[in-house]
Image (cartoon, grey):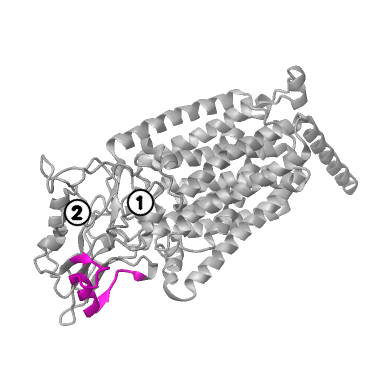
């Protein structure tokens, strides 16, 4: 089994609901985003490239690609980031991470991984999100974990469930009959920077 | 580092040739004495204490107080880490080659060179520790070792290297005392040479095995690191021995200094040659031209051109016979060390300066060093990372620990040359004087 995701870029409207619900579900600390929506246009977010009438804008949601061949897993000196052979999810063990930031340096997808540069702060006085969301720790690295606690209960990741445009599909890439596999088989797809040999488990439908 | 010694050890005060007992007479019993050295030791100790205090500030208040951020996750600490591993490996290579291949004349400097290597590798290990977010979890490296990680390889090789350097120093002393055979000494020298080359190659692999960074991902990185190690290591050894000769700590024939200087010039040229090969391969065709542009005209141009200028001046000074005075050699060596440091800066920053994902994104205080505009693309204008005063302070503390070890070693350890070594140098000095005399007459 290899969990993966298809994100339909023709449906994504750049509303960033995925960023917000991800933060809530996983109690992601202040200043950190596991799920970001990049603007394919001008330098600044939500700006277009070019000038009227030749302007264009697009969106690219990015998060951990849960690569089939993850550079981070190979590089972590203590195995604090590891790939679950059962599910294909790349996990992050906060209790083990020594904070060397090697995984950040080797991940080809700039900005995917975040380090807690200070004591993690909550937006509220109490932890938000799912009861089983892991407790964040100072001086450890974190990233999208495909909502492993929700997936283990048979639910979908929060970003998939709550995407307003229904652009996201989650499922088993190894099962040819799964909805996600069918989409990837029938639509034209792209992966982010496939040239590094990581084989990302997130496919963009273009 | 060496400035402390030369400044602190004026000729009159530093020498104390008093023999103390039979063992002392055999070794010449010259130690680095003098008030200047004592003051230097005290200053270093204070810097170490300040450094530890600042490190505690970093750990308690968070590494948000450093300049490092998610998009430039390594900084001054690991730049200096690679720099000091290089200094250390180069010093050990320079001290082991003559022993391994039976070359004469470098006897008086080899123990000092090994000790400076030990000090430098301790600085390097210290810099890794202060860079870690969770130093209390260091033990995990030995319990949960992931042997596919280049960082793990480096930890293992560094540990082996430190132990082996100390064994090598001990072997030297045993050999001098006549308690170790010449063959055994040679074998240990060869092992030391191999491990010194490998320690710096493995350090290069931490960077070059990351395909995601255009500037890092080159097979040349390993040999290139060794070349840089050779030039800055030799330069450091040269500064130290010239200063110690001035201080009367050891005798060394000028012909040996000349030979070392010429070797240094060759090492620097090899280093520059590798750089030129890499730049041509990157810039000739395709995506790598970003790297060349970044170095020659882009954000890292000040470091790139400073390195080239430092090294070019140093080579001229080292090959021109008239400039090979004590001061000239020391200045040239210092220029080489500065040049190599600037190269380390280019390697570290150059990896992070070119991002793979450059689409429009929001920057905040954790994502990148220059986040104030709130726009990621603007954060890459200029140098992507710059250290904070806290990082300078902690780094100074760790380096001071190395200088402290060096000075204490020179004062209290029997690192000074044996009488045999000194006699050999005196003979060489005399032979030179005789060769010069008829020419003058």
Asked if labels 1 and 2 share a chain, the reply is: no
* Residue B19, placed above or below residue A88: above
Q: Residue furthest top?
A: B21
Query: Callout 1: residue from which chain?
Result: B
* Residue A89, placed above or below residue B114: below
Q: Give the numbered dot on residue A76.
A: none
Quadrant housing residue B211: bottom left
Residue that numbered label 2 is attached to: A152
Residue found at x 62% / y 30%: B410
Say left or right for B342 vs A173. Answer: right
Task: Give the residues in magenta.
Answer: A170-194
Residue B143 % position (x, y): 42, 40
Quadrant housing residue B64: top left
Q: Quarter of the image containing the N terminus of chain B?
A: top right
How far is disc 1 from disc 2 in space, using C-alphas? Answer: 32 Å
Residue found at x 41% / y 47%: B76
Foreground pick, B198 / B69: B198
- Crowdedness near tag 2: few (<14), some (14–19) or many (≥20) residues, C-alpha within 10 Å: few
Residue that numbered label 1 is attached to: B73
Query: Magenta includes A177?
Result: yes
Say left or right for B234 vs A189. Answer: right
Q: Is residue A135 visible?
A: yes
Query: Callout 2: residue from which chain?
Result: A
Foreground pick, B404 / A187: A187
Residue B418 % position (x, y): 76, 31
> Which one is closest to the eye, mark 1 or mark 2?
2
Query: Magenta includes B184?
Result: no
* Callout 1 secondary element: loop
């Amino acid at each position: 089994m290899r969990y993966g995701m298809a994100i339909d870029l023709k449906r994504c409207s750049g509303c960033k609901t995925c960023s917000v619900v991800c933060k809530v579900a996983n109690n992601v600390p202040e200043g950190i985003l596991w799920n970001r929506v990049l603007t394919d246009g001008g330098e600044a977010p939500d700006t277009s490239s070019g000038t009227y009438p030749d302007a264009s804008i697009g969106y690219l949601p990015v998060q951990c690609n849960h690569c089939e061949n993850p550079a981070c897993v190979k590089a972590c000196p203590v195995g604090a980031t590891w790939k679950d052979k059962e599910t294909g999810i790349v996990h992050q063990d906060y209790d083990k991470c020594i904070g060397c930031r090697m995984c950040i340096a080797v991940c080809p997808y700039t900005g995917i991984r975040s380090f807690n540069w200070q004591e993690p702060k909550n937006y509220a006085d109490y932890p938000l999100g799912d009861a089983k969301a892991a407790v964040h720790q100072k001086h450890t690295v974190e990233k999208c974990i495909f909502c492993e606690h929700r997936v283990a209960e048979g639910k979908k990741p929060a970003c998939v469930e709550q995407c307003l445009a229904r652009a996201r599909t989650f499922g088993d890439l190894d099962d040819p009959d799964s909805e996600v596999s069918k989409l990837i088989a029938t639509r034209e797809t792209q992966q982010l920077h496939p040239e590094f040999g990581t084989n990302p488990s997130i496919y963009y439908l273009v | 580092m060496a400035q402390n010694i030369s400044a602190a050890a004026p000729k009159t005060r530093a020498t104390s040739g008093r023999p103390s007992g039979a063992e002392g007479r055999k070794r010449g019993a010259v130690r680095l004495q003098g008030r200047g050295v004592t003051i230097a030791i005290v200053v270093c100790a204070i810097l170490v204490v300040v450094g530890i205090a600042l490190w505690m500030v970093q750990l308690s208040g968070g590494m948000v107080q450093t300049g490092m951020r998610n998009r430039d996750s390594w900084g001054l600490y690991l730049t200096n880490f690679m720099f000091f591993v290089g200094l250390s490996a180069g010093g050990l290579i320079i001290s082991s080659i003559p022993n391994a291949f039976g070359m004469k004349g470098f006897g008086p400097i080899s123990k000092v060179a090994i000790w400076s290597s030990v000090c430098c590798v301790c600085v390097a290990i210290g810099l890794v520790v202060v860079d870690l977010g969770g130093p209390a979890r260091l033990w995990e490296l030995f319990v949960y070792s992931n042997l596919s990680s280049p960082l793990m390889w480096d930890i293992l090789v560094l540990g082996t290297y430190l132990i082996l350097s100390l064994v090598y120093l001990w072997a030297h002393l045993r050999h001098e005392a006549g308690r170790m055979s010449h063959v055994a000494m040679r074998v240990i020298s060869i092992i030391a040479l191999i491990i010194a080359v490998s320690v710096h190659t493995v350090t290069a692999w931490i960077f070059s095995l990351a395909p995601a960074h255009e500037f890092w991902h080159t097979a040349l990185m390993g040999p290139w690191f060794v070349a840089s190690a050779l030039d800055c290591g030799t330069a450091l050894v040269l500064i130290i021995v010239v200063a110690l000769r001035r201080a009367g700590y050891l005798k060394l024939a000028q012909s040996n200094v000349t030979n070392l200087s010429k070797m240094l010039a060759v090492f620097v040229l090899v280093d520059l040659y590798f750089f030129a090969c890499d730049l041509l391969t990157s810039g000739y065709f395709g995506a790598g031209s970003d790297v060349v542009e970044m170095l020659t005209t882009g954000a890292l141009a000040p470091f790139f051109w400073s390195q080239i200028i430092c090294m070019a001046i140093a080579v001229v000074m080292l090959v021109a016979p008239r400039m090979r005075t004590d001061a000239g050699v020391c200045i040239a060596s210092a220029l080489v060390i500065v040049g190599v440091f600037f190269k380390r800066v280019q390697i570290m920053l150059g990896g992070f300066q070119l991002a793979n994902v450059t689409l429009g994104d929001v920057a905040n205080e954790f994502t990148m060093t220059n986040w104030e505009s709130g726009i990621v693309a603007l954060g890459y204008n200029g140098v992507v990372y710059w250290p904070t005063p806290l990082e300078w302070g902690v780094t100074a503390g760790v380096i001071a620990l190395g200088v402290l070890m060096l000075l204490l070693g020179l004062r209290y350890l029997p690192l000074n040359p044996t009488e045999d070594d000194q006699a050999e140098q005196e003979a060489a000095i005399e032979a030179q004087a005789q060769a010069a005399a008829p020419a003058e007459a």
